[in-house]
Amino acid sequence: MCYNRLVIENEREETDMGRIITIANQKGGVGKTTTAINLAACLAEAGQHVMLVDFDPQGNASSGLGLEEKEFERTVYDMLAEEASVEECIAREVQENLDVLPSDMNLAAAEIEFQEVDNKEKLLKQSLDQIRDNYDFILIDCPPSLNILTINALTAADTVLVPIQCEYYALEGLNQMLKTVDLVKRKLNPSLEMEGVVFTMYDARTNLSLQVVESVKSNLNQTIYKTIIPRNVRLAEAPSHGMPINRYSSRSTGAESYRMLAAEVISRGEV
Ligand SMILES: Nc1ncnc2c1ncn2[C@@H]1O[C@H](COP(=O)(O)OP(=O)(O)OP(=O)(O)O)[C@@H](O)[C@H]1O
Ligand SMILES: [Mg+2]
């Protein structure tokens, strides 16, 4: 089955622009993709119209939602390279209310290939601005680095959500990340704000998890989400079944926690 198809009309009646949230942390394996997939799926379950942009050449957000490379002809790379329109690259209704802009290894070439392109930091923004009115939320899953892809994602975003893994080196590199956010805000995207920090893989059986949460709370002058994502084996299993947690194991603590996070994210937008 091929998910890509061209849709010309604007499907949404509302006129307000979608909120674009970039999920970033240059540290690897902290739960960015798990948060991107499951927050997107739980926002969609709550009736929000959502697009998830897989902006990592690893393609984990695409495969974690069951999108295999053979199933899509176009990717976010084709969109950036202007080889296809934004609309042509979208995999539609991967779940109810949830569209995906898939990615694959081609995106790894972006850093070198777009080196000489004018406004190379704004390529993603230029594309997403064309479609943001069609969505309530656009989430962008970043690779584990502060490269041109992450800079593009920060430039396109309204806010940045930083997952922090509850482990000893949690704060390592975080300052660099926050400096990059600040730099992008000053040079490229003045309206960029911090969405906040989300703790992931919290293990209630260890003192360490609690200590990390306490130390981040006292050291980091950032908004911290009340919802803490627990370490939950169902969350780790779900991607290999190509499903978000609310479909794979709807009553698991992982599903419940991402539903709570989605409710918090929605309520922040209403303040
Ligand atoms: N709350 C959780 N409970 C159990 N396992 C988790 C949880 N969150 C993430 N994982 C697992 O930890 C690993 C890393 O998570 P994930 O891929 O979301 O991190 P990432 O930050 O996107 O990684 P990368 O930097 O490589 O993109 C994965 O195997 C994932 O299934
Ligand atoms: Mg990832």
Image (cartoon, rainbow, N blue to C red):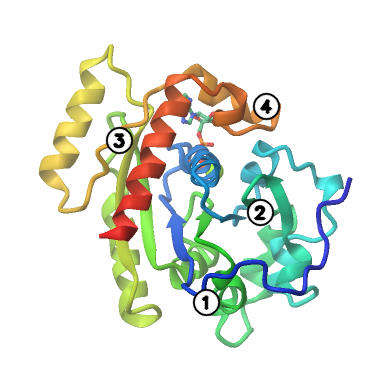
Say if disc 1 is inside 8 Å of ligand 1: no
Residue drawn at x 23%, y 21% is 208
Number of numbered markers: 4
Q: Position of residue 109 (x, y in %)?
A: 69, 63
- Toward the viewer: 99 or 47? 47
Mark closer to the observer (4, 2):
2
Label 2 or label 1, whichever comes before in sequence order: 2
> What kind of residue is marked 4?
Ser
Asked if labels 3 and 2 touch by Cβ distance under 8 angstroms, the answer is: no
Badge 1 local density, few (<14 within 10 Å), some, or many (20+)? Answer: many
Earlier residue among tags 4 and 2: 2
Q: Residue 61: horizontal and vertical position, in percent?
A: 62, 44
> Mark 3 packing: few (<14 Cα in 10 Å), some, or many (20+)?
some
Query: On the image, numbered disc 3 is attached to which residue?
Result: 227
Label 1 – label 3 distance at C-alpha: 32 Å
| Amino acid type of the residue tagged 1 in the rendering | Glu
The residue under label 4 is 240
- Under circle 3, the secondary element is loop
Residue 121, label in figure: 1
User: Is ligand 1 within 8 Å of the beta carbon of the residue shown at mark 3?
Assistant: no
